Amino acid sequence: MPTADSQFTAYLSSHGLRMTRERRVILEQVLSLRGHFDVDDLLARLRKSGRGVSRATLYRNLTHLVDSGLVHKVEMDRGQARYEPMIGRHHHDHMVCLSCGAILEFESDEVERIQEEVCRKKKFVMTGHTHQIRGFCAACARKGAVPWTGG
Amino acid sequence: MPTADSQFTAYLSSHGLRMTRERRVILEQVLSLRGHFDVDDLLARLRKSGRGVSRATLYRNLTHLVDSGLVHKVEMDRGQARYEPMIGRHHHDHMVCLSCGAILEFESDEVERIQEEVCRKKKFVMTGHTHQIRGFCAACARKGAVPWTGG
DNA sequence: TCATAATTGAGACGGTGTTGCAACAAGGGG
DNA sequence: CCCCTTGTTGCAACACCGTCTCAATTATGA
């Protein structure tokens, strides 16, 4: 089983890119999180660890990590992205709590199958998808946390 | 069958809001589009029609139109939102061409059912969802329009 | 008509991400 | 092992999208 590091290095060199100190540091930190995170979060952790990188570099390399398949980008509402390492993980989608921000995961082979069928029917070449359910998690719903029930 | 105008007015007054010249102008323009549009697009058309409104007003009222159910907001990647009138239309989701920006629509009762089932299982109260397939439409795929095939 | 509260427009502001550029460094060849 | 080429980095300015503030304006009910 290839390590994440060697997997990333392979991706890089096959694209004419180089493995650098910064890329290793970022990858290491990302893997240590083993959960969803956002860019500022990661940036702060890196700084705190004494091995910080610039914001630009972090953004640039998160893109590469996503392209290499090691990390998954989760587009949230209003242009804020979150990421999550995908090492050894199966594809899944997300439920986002609008009150506390919690992210639950779900997966459905059936939905995947329907997607492919839809694409085939319209001759659309799928490269990715976003399937996100918004609402309130059990705890928040119980507390009646609703943003606009009207009135 | 209630007109869109009266439907919007009803929504507004039931929320302690008022029907104004600007709101009427926006609604009218939105309906005349009968397709997907983005905010700048709409803003430009309003200006050109000689009945412009400010950007702030447009944003504020698009929110109300969405809340009233007359318009649907389509969250795109990278924080840019598009909208589409929903008068007399059934719910649907979107396929977005990464090359030409075309938006195809699809719908699946099966996916909707699965979503509800997933939510029920986790006691998650769904208020909305985004289901978007990214890729290349038939025409662009044929032209070989791919952003990063590597190499 | 008047009073009151919602609405508007203009521009400043905020968050998120990108870009241009000069200094720096990875890595293959000699 | 050093050099050279070319990718990489950090910084700071920039761009994008949308929101907020606030004074002036307008809709609505009494």
Image (cartoon, coloured by chain):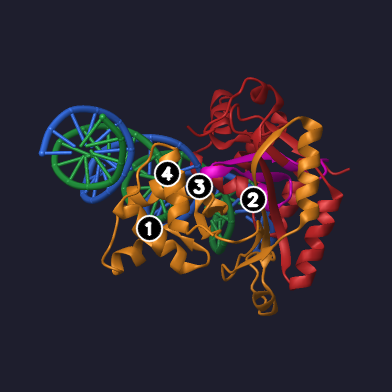
Chain colours: A red, B orange, C blue, D green
Q: Which quadrant does the N terminus of chain A fall into?
A: top right
Name the residue tied to disc 4.
Answer: B12
Q: What residue is shown at x 69% (from left), y 38% (from top)?
A: A95
Which one is earlier in the sequence, the residue at label 3 or at label 1? Answer: 1
Q: What residue is shown at x 33% (from left), y 49% (from top)?
A: B57
Name the residue tied to disc 1.
Answer: B26
| Stretch in magenta | A64-93
Is the C-beta separation of discs 3 and 2 under 8 Å? no
> Could you tell me the amino acid type at mark 2?
His
Which chain does tag 3 point to? B
- Crowding at mark 3 (Cα within 10 Å: few <14, some 14-19, many 20+): some
Q: Is A76 located above or below residue B72 in the figure?
A: above
> Could you tell me the amino acid type at mark 4?
Leu
Which one is earlier in the sequence, the residue at label 1 or at label 4? Answer: 4
- Callout 1 secondary element: helix
| Residue nearest the viewer, comparing B148 with B1 | B1
- Callout 2 secondary element: helix
Numbered mark located on residue B49 in the image: none
Which chain does tag 2 point to? A
The image quadrant that residue B140 belongs to is bottom right
Numbered mark located on residue A64 in the image: 2
Q: Is residue B83 magenta?
A: no
Name the residue tied to disc 3.
Answer: B68
